Image (cartoon, helix red, strand yellow):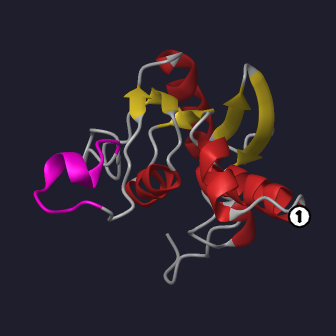
Amino acid sequence: MPLNYVTSCVIVEDGKVISSGNNRTTETQNASRHAELEVIDVLLQQWQSMGFSPLEVAEKFSKCDLYVTCEPCIRCASALSILGIRDVYYGCANDKFGGCGSILSLHVGISDRLPNSKGCGQKGFMCTGGIMVSKAVSLLRTFYDQGNPNAPKPHTPI
């Protein structure tokens, strides 16, 4: 895995990897291109091109598990909840933006947390962190130690 892909992600169905992706925020200079959204987009495009209805897509996601290096951020955890992914497994916690317990607990569906929120689309999912945590932290440290070649140049010289 190239070091510019610090967060990798796969979606598994019936024990088989059906989609994989990497965090491409640096490469694309687009903050929405987290690994989780990359793998979701691949599957949505694939399943839609196969003619699956929205209901069939939802049913497929409900049978899938997601594995990712770092805890999904608030935006990604919310997207996973709306899609109805079954389980999420991650390496290290995301202490700044984590959506699976570090900052917010979006893996618990909104209908489980708020009264009168039925039909809001937030289904929730099972979430397990700490999978190969030392390897995940090592990947992040190596990435940040090498610097970001795509980062904007500072306005003032250091």
Residue 136, horizontal then vertical, whole percent: 55, 26
- Residue sitting at 85 percent across and 56 percent down? 46
Q: Is residue 111 visible?
A: yes
Q: Is residue 6 visible?
A: no
Q: Residue furthest left?
A: 115
Q: Which image quarter is the N terminus in? A: top right
Q: Which residue is mark 1?
A: 49
Residue 21, horizontal then vertical, whole percent: 74, 46
Comparing 90 with 60, the one in front is: 60
Is 87 displayed left or right of 110 in the figure?
A: right
Identify the image quadrant of residue 66.
Answer: top right
Q: Is residue 132 magenta?
A: no
Identify the image quadrant of residue 15.
Answer: top right
- Residue sitting at 46 percent across and 45 percent down? 72
Residue 113, horizontal then vertical, whole percent: 16, 49
Dominant secondary structure (helix, strand or loop) of the stretch shown in magenta: loop
Q: Residue furthest bottom?
A: 155
Circle 1: is it few (<14), some (14-19), or many (20+) Cα within 10 Å? Answer: few
- Residue sitting at 88 percent across and 64 percent down? 49
- Residue stretch in magenta: 107-118
Comparing 148 with 108, the one in front is: 108
